[in-house]
Image (cartoon, coloured by chain):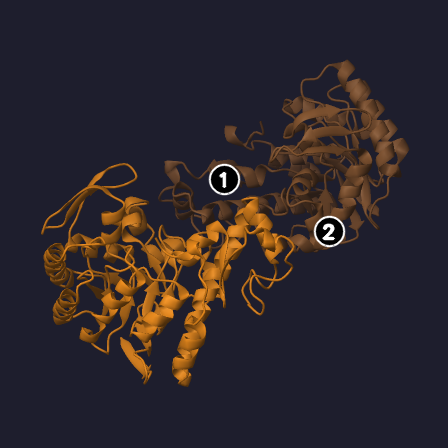
Chain colours: A brown, B orange
Amino acid sequence: MFELLRTHRESKARRGRLTTAHGVIETPAFMPVGTQGSVKSVSPRELRELKAQVVLGNTYHLFVRPGLDVIRHFGGLHRFMNWDLPILTDSGGYQIFSLAKLRKITDEGVRFQNHLDGTPTFISPEIAMEIQATLGSDIAMVLDECPPWPCEHEYAARSLEMTIRWARRSKDAPHANGQLVFGIVQGATFADLRRQSAEATVQIGFDGYAIGGVSVGEPEPEMMLAVENSEPYLPADKPRYAMGLGTPPQLIELIARGVDMFDCVLPTRIARNGTAFTAAGTINLKNAEFTLDTRPIEEGCTCAACSEFARGYIRHLIKAEEILGLRLITLHNLHFYLTLMQRTRDAIDGGGFGEFRQSFVGGYKLRGDTIPA
Amino acid sequence: MFELLRTHRESKARRGRLTTAHGVIETPAFMPVGTQGSVKSVSPRELRELKAQVVLGNTYHLFVRPGLDVIRHFGGLHRFMNWDLPILTDSGGYQIFSLAKLRKITDEGVRFQNHLDGTPTFISPEIAMEIQATLGSDIAMVLDECPPWPCEHEYAARSLEMTIRWARRSKDAPHANGQLVFGIVQGATFADLRRQSAEATVQIGFDGYAIGGVSVGEPEPEMMLAVENSEPYLPADKPRYAMGLGTPPQLIELIARGVDMFDCVLPTRIARNGTAFTAAGTINLKNAEFTLDTRPIEEGCTCAACSEFARGYIRHLIKAEEILGLRLITLHNLHFYLTLMQRTRDAIDGGGFGEFRQSFVGGYKLRGDTIPA
C-alpha cells in the first residue's frame, strides 16, 4: 500500500506514495481538516481545485452530530459530504479528552458525556473501529489515550501500556473492506517511553504509524524530540503521520525528521482572524498598513484569492466581517500548505531538499497569533 | 439606454433591455444585494456563474467602511470588489434613516452619526451624487427621504416635496461619466401623493424611476397599492425599479404591475436561517424531517448546491453552523431568484406570462420566517 520512492541523503526526508481505496496520496502530504464533514468555509469542488489529496474527518464530532445513523443512511462519509478522494478519520480519542465532559477511562474504554447535549456515551477500541467502518474512511486510526502536557513519567507509562492494549484490540476488531489502519505512538516527552511505545505498536503491525501526543501545548523542541525519539523505531516501508501539526517551518523540519503526513487546523483557523501565510512569514490583513494595498496576498500566487483580489479588499471584508474575506484567506492558506508540500515533494525528487529546507525555514517569520496554543 | 422589447396584453408586464456602462441588463431583473462590497458569502465568480446581471451596492455602508478614499484608491467599486458587470448604488438615504443615529433632516441635507463609530457626517443630495460618482456605479439613485410606515398624510406630503427638491438638485449635480441616474417616487400609502410625486419626478427627468417607501413594514396590499398608484404616471420608455422587494410571488405580481427591476436581501438573509426557496414554496432545512433526505433542495435544479449536495447534508451543515451550509443555500436561493426572472422574461417573450403568473403565484407557500419584517 505504501511505496517509498526516494529518500534524502542528508536528512530523513522521504518521498512516498500511499495507495488507498479512494486513490493515491503522494507524500509528504498535508490533509485539510474537515472536522464536521466540511473543511471550514470550503466546498469539495474548491478542495479539488486546490489539489487536496485527502481530507481528515473527526470521528468524535461526526459521531455526536449528525450521528452514525445519518452517515450510514447516506452510504458513508464520502457520499455524505460529496468527496470521492481519500479520507482519514481520527479515532475520536483526542476530542473525547479535550472536549467531552465527565470522562472515565478504564481499560475497557472511555465513558463520557458529549459536549453538545451531555448524552452519556461509551467508546471502546472496538467501537472506535466500528464507527470508522461506518464512516467508511480510507485510513482509520486506533483509539489511544493522548496524555496532556506536561505529564509525569509514571502516568505516561501506564497510559501508553493501555494504549498498546487498545491498539491490539483495534487491530483485531473488524474494520471496513480496504480500510487502512494506523497505530499511534505515545509516550509523552520521555525518550524511553517513545521507544517502548513505537516498538510495541510496530510489533502489533499497522498500515502506518502516527506520532501522537504532540500539538498538546508542548514547546517546539519537545515536539521535535518526541518525533526524533519515535521515528527510529518505525519501519521505513510504512507512512508516518504527525498528528495535529504544524506551522509551515515545522512541517519542513518534521519532514526532515522522517514524517510523511500532517493535519492541522492552523491554515483554516487563523484565516478567521485575518492571518495569511506568505513565503516570508505570516501577515495579518486586519492591520491598517494593508488598507490601500492593491497587491494580492502574495505576488505570483495562483490561488483563487490572489488571482482575483487585492489585500486592501480582503482587509475590508475581514474588518466588515464578510464571509467572503474568511473564504479567500482560507483558500489562500490551504493553497499555501498544499503547494508547500508539492514543492517539498519536488525538492526531494530533484535531490534539492537540503537547500529548500534551509532557504524556506531560515528567517520564516510567524506572528504570535500563528503559534498554536 | 432603455429599450422596451415587448409588453404583455393582459397585464402591465414588460420585457426590456437597459444598457449601462458595464453592460446590458435584461429586464425584468433581480439584483443581488452586495451591501458592503460583497454579496454575503458569495464570490464574484459565483455570481457570474449564477448569471447575475447586476449587483446592488449600499452607498451608506461603503461610505462608512472602507470609506471613499479607499474606493477611490482602488479605482472605484467595480475594481475594488472585482465585479465588471453593472452595479447600482442606492443613495444611502434608506440606511441613514434606518441605521444611523442622531439624525437631523433639513432642506440642506441630513446630519447623522454613523452606526459604527458615531462619526458626525453630513450628506446632501449633491454629496450623495458625488459619493456615487466616486463609487463609479452604473446606476446612481437620488437622495430621498423614505418615510416610515405608518405615516400621516401631512408628514408624507411635506417629505415628498423635500424629496422632489432634492431630486432636482441631484439631477443638477455633477455625476460620473456614463452613469445613469434614477429618481425615486415617494408618497407613502396615499394615492394623491404617489401621483404628485411620480409626476414631479418625471418632470425633472431621469434615466429610470424607482418606487420607494415600500418594504418598510407595510402590509402587502398597501405595497401593491403604492406601486399601482405610482406606475401610471411613469413613462413607458424608462425602467421602473421597486426598491427592497420582495418574495418570489411578490416579484411576479409587481412585474404584472409594470415593474422591471428588484433588489432584496431575502434570498441571502433567510439562507442563514436554513430557509430555501423551491417551486412550491419555502422549506426550512433545520427541520428534523430533512435529516435523512437524500434529495437535493429542489429536484431538477441546476444550481451548485442541488447538483452536488443532499438536503440531509446541508441540514447537518446548518445545524453544525458550518459556513458551507449557508453558502449552499445562498447559492440556491440566488439561483432561484435569478432563474425566476429568466423564466419570467421567457414567458413575456413567448406570450405566456399570464399562465406563468397564475401557475407560479397560485399556491406558493411561504413560511412565516420568509415574510419580510
Asked if residue B245 is positioned above or below residue B233 in the image, the reply reads above
| Tag of residue B136 | none
The correct choice, above or below, for B66 with respect to A199 in the image is below
Crowding near the residue tagged with mark 2, few <14, some 14–19, many ≥20 C-alpha atoms within 10 Å: some
Q: Quadrant of residue B26?
A: bottom left
Q: Which mark is residue A72?
A: 2
Question: As rendered, which of A4 and B237 lies closer to the eye?
Answer: B237
Q: Is residue B78 left or right of residue A367?
A: left
Provide the chain ID for the residue under circle 1.
A
The vertical placement of B70 against B178, above or below, is above
Q: Chain of mark 2?
A: A
Residue at which label 1 appears = A272
* Distance CA(mark 2)–CA(mark 1): 32 Å
Q: Nearer the viewer, residue B111 or B22?
A: B111
Is A158 drawn above or below residue B219 in the view shown? above
Is residue A200 left or right of B107 when viewed as pictured?
right
- The secondary element bearing badge 1 is classed as helix
Amino acid under disc 1: Arg
Q: Judge left or right: residue B193 versus residue A350.
A: left
Q: Is residue A334 visible?
A: yes
Identify the amino acid type marked 2. Arg
**Which corner quadrant of the image does residue B257 belong to?**
bottom left
- In this view, the residue in front, A115 or A135, is A115
Q: Answer few, some or many: residues within 10 Å of disc 1's Cα (few below 14, many 20 plus, some between 14 and 19).
A: some
Quadrant the C terminus of chain A occupies: top right
> Residue A117, image x and y in percent?
61, 35
x, y percent for residue A77:
70, 50
- Marks 2 and 1 close (CB-CB < 8 Å): no
- Residue B178 in view here: no
Left or right relative to B100: residue B291: right
- The mark that comes first in sequence, 2 or 1, is 2
Q: Residue at x 65, y 28 (%)?
A: A98
